[in-house]
Image (cartoon, helix red, strand yellow):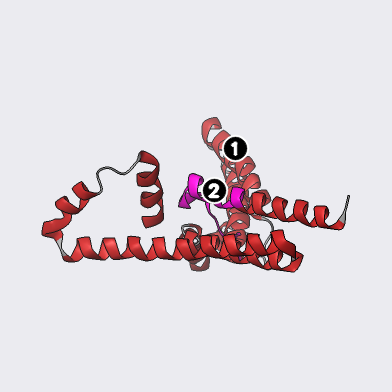
């Protein structure tokens, strides 16, 4: 294969991959985006496993009902998958007994993990970063197709920013002019279902 054909093939592949990623983000919606597990989330998952283990041991030692023993054993088994999913923390909370588990720091860690678990990355920033990456890769490849891809991706980035500004402006207008909100919605009543879905996801 000639060098120019190789460059064309690589550029086209990069463009297809970038387009698929961007389309996947748009179709999947914002809720599918997640940050990597934080140290607090990893510690909380490990602590949950220790909590479930100590609870199961306590249930056996106190000779509680078979149902409660079975529930705590199942909870212990289920908690192992959380640790496996999040990964082991860098630093392990010092817990050996039920008193250690029930310390105030454990409750605080659980609250921190809950808050960070609810965080989501800004889809606009993710899309912009992917477009920037595509521009950088295409520029490195060079050639006619690389230059064309760079131009295309720059236009896509500019259109994305413009769309974000338009949506933000529309939302601001509706908040400041509540009496005109019904007329505003009616003016946009001819939008296709796909456009409505896209705008709704972007507003979220």
Residue 105 location, x and y as percent? Answer: 52, 68
Q: Is residue 122 above or below residue 190?
A: below
Q: Nearer the viewer, mark 1 or mark 2?
A: 2
Q: Nearer the viewer, residue 56 or 139?
A: 139
Range covered by the magenta-colored residues: 19-38
- Please tell me whether residue 35 belongs to the stretch shown in magenta: yes
Instruction: Check disc 2 and report the residue beneath it.
Output: 23
Instruction: Tell me which numbered mark, 1 or 2, is placed earlier along the sequence.
Output: 2
> Where is residue 11, by image quadrant?
bottom right
Q: Residue at x 50, y 61 (%)?
A: 121
Q: CA distance from mark 1 to mark 2?
A: 40 Å
**Residue at (79, 57) in percent of width and height:** 7
Frontmost residue, 98 versus 129: 129
The picture quadrant where one finds residue 18 is: bottom right
Q: Badge 1: few (under 14), some or many (20 or more) residues near its Cα, within 10 Å?
A: some
- Image quarter in which the C terminus is found: bottom left
Which residue sits at x=57%, y=47%?
A: 55
The spot of residue 190 in percent (x, y) is 27, 42
Q: Is residue 5 above or below residue 106?
A: above
Question: Residue lying farthest left?
Answer: 179
Q: Which residue has dot 1 on it?
A: 74
Q: Position of residue 144 (x, y in %)?
A: 71, 62
Residue 8 visible to the viewer? yes
| Outermost residue to the right | 1
Element at badge 2?
Answer: helix
Q: Is residue 153 magenta?
A: no
Residue 179 in the image: x percent, y percent?
11, 58
| Label 1: element kind | helix
Horizontal side of residue 61 vs 3, given as left or right: left
Residue 204 in sight from this viewpoint: no
């Amino acid at each position: 294969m000639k060098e120019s054909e190789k460059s064309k093939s690589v550029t086209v592949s990069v463009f297809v991959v970038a387009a698929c990623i961007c389309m996947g983000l748009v179709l999947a919606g914002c809720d599918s985006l997640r940050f990597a597990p934080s140290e607090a989330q990893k510690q909380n998952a490990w602590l949950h496993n220790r909590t479930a283990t100590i609870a199961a041991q306590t249930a056996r030692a106190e000779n509680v009902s078979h149902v409660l023993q079975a529930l705590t054993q199942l909870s212990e088994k289920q908690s192992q998958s959380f640790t496996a999913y999040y990964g082991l923390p860098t630093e392990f909370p010092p817990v050996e007994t039920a008193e250690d588990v029930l310390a105030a720091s454990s409750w605080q860690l659980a609250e921190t993990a809950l808050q960070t678990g609810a965080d989501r990355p800004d889809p606009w920033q993710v899309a912009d970063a992917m477009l920037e990456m595509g521009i950088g890769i295409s520029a490195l490849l060079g050639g006619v197709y690389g230059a064309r891809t760079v131009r295309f991706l720059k236009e896509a980035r500019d259109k994305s920013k413009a769309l974000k500004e338009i949506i933000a402006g529309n939302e601001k207008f509706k908040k400041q002019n509540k009496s005109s909100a019904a007329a505003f919605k009616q003016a946009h009543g001819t939008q296709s279902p796909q456009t409505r879905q896209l705008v709704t996801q972007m507003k979220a």
